Amino acid sequence: MQDIQQILDSLPVSYRGPGGAIAVLKDGRLAGQQVWGFADLEKRIAMTDQTLVPICSITKQMVCAVLKDLERHPTALMANGASLAQAYSAALKDLLPAEIGPGSEVTLQHLCDNQTGIRDYWAMTLLWGGHPEGRFSLDEDAPQALQHLQSLHFEPGSQYAYANTNFHILARAIEQVSGRSISELLTERVFEPAGMATAQFCEKTDQHVGPCVGYEGSAEQGYIPARNQVEWSGDAGVVASLQDMIAYESWLQRQWDDPASIYRTLAEQPHFADGALAHYGNGLAHVEIAGFKAIGHSGALRGFRLQRLHVPSDKLSVIVMLNHEADPAAAAEFVLRNALDLREPVASSVEADPAWFGDYLDPVSQLAIRIAPAGTGEISLSYAGYPETLHLVVAGRARSREMEAAISGDDLWLRRIEDNREIRAIRLHTSNAPTPTASLQGNFHCVELGSTFHAFGLGNHCYAAFDGFLGKGPAVQLQQLAPEVWLLKCPRGMDAPAPGDWTLVVDRDAAGRTTGFTLGCWLARGLKYQRIDADH
């Protein structure tokens, strides 16, 4: 172990503003912490280790802990044994649309492991006419969102895809079966046992306990308060201070030392239906950092970024809490590497084969893949909504922690380790033939989603907007990659991070007229839209 406090003292320089808090625990005890900047820039309120911050998706593992604790210590209203399983099965039947309920075999464990194939409802708020700063109600909007999820984008248990919807459904099922609110259960079975003295559950993002403000922007552009009005439950909702999170990590370390504990049960690495090892389960991501196995999770809401990591072999934990949109995972890994005196990976000197660079289409998911140069010995690949850096092994092969890639002519081969998918994508070639100028003009409808798409403009100067049960959404830009393939931009969304670029693949009839298209992003794939105006 290096000097922890010296390592932490260097963090505010790299993650300066507006504010942040970080702590390191060794053997379940605080080894050092650093807090800097402001919780509220306008009011000059300093960030402290008692400032409450929404921990966002870190909530997921706490909900899974409640589920497991209820199995061991049911409430008075809960059944036992086989009848308890039947109660959960009935709850899922009530919550899932009838179209995907029968035969789909979505289980509680699929929900906990993000293996259901259910699409992410926050991503699809764009398609329902949502605005980034708009309101999303648990009572009115969430039930409609669930009823519009009438198909899956893969067979349950076969793959991994992050979906906040899974944990929303999980929390609702827990409440229905236990007869208690998720807020009460978290307080009773997580906050109080862990000694999280000020932690609380707050499902309404516009009613978070102050004074902490989340900020969008950068030092160059300036920081602007992020306005959030969504309501969530199960997928997020816990608000906690750094002191609360220190208590939580200490509690988890004590549980780790007991092989029969709930945390040890939650941290068992799951598998897919084909037997392959999965890297996400029970709200916990399993990663490897320089040979050390770590368990953790990130959290994000517009204006907030968080990360917790636990290295069980060394009884070392790191918590990062930022009220701005810097990378908390990079900060946590920096601390771990320095605390454990690990060397940074040696940069590859291999030059990328120019054949890498360009745009591709995965014909199965119908999603575009974009590859661009990065640093020396690296390429940048965008597929799952954000750019991923791969390190070159040789000129035509590259890998990262989550992915392996190879290029051969116009064929791109990907192995997405976390997702349990192998992909053969085909290069997109721009055509010299004139593209029909009105190819996307007009109106299209997705029956499953109850979503209407409007396209405006000509050629490559196109915009689109969506109408749905959330209203009439803002216009967004379209970019043409090939005659039949477009990107639809989504840089900001109700949740964070936003889903990024959506891929739109055009369908035409024998006369070359656009009859519809398939739309998707990594969080929500394979959505079919059909033209509803007859004059195109």
Image (spheres, rainbow, N blue to C red):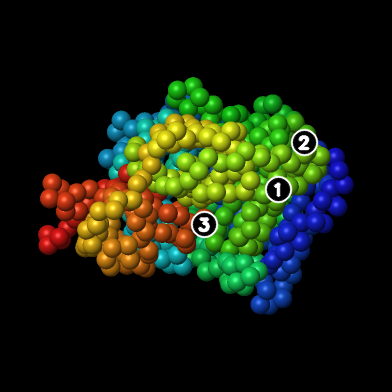
Residue placed most toward the observer, 424 or 418: 424
Cα–Cα span, label 1 and label 3: 19 Å
Among the 4 quarters of the image, the one containing residue 90: top left
User: Split into 4 quadrants, where in the image is the C terminus?
Assistant: bottom left
The structure residue drawn at horizontal position 56% and vertical position 36%, both measured from the top left corner, is: 395
User: Split into 4 quadrants, where in the image is the N terminus?
Assistant: top right
Element under label 2? loop
The structure residue drawn at horizontal position 53% and vertical position 30%, both measured from the top left corner, is: 278
Residue placed most toward the observer, 488 or 48: 488
* Residue 456: x %, y % from top left: 27, 67
From the image, tell me which residue sits under label 1. Answer: 332
From the image, tell me which residue sits under label 3. Answer: 496
* Residue 120: x %, y % from top left: 42, 48
Say which amino acid is labelled 2: Lys
From the image, tell me which residue sits under label 2. Answer: 315
Q: Is residue 449 visible?
A: no
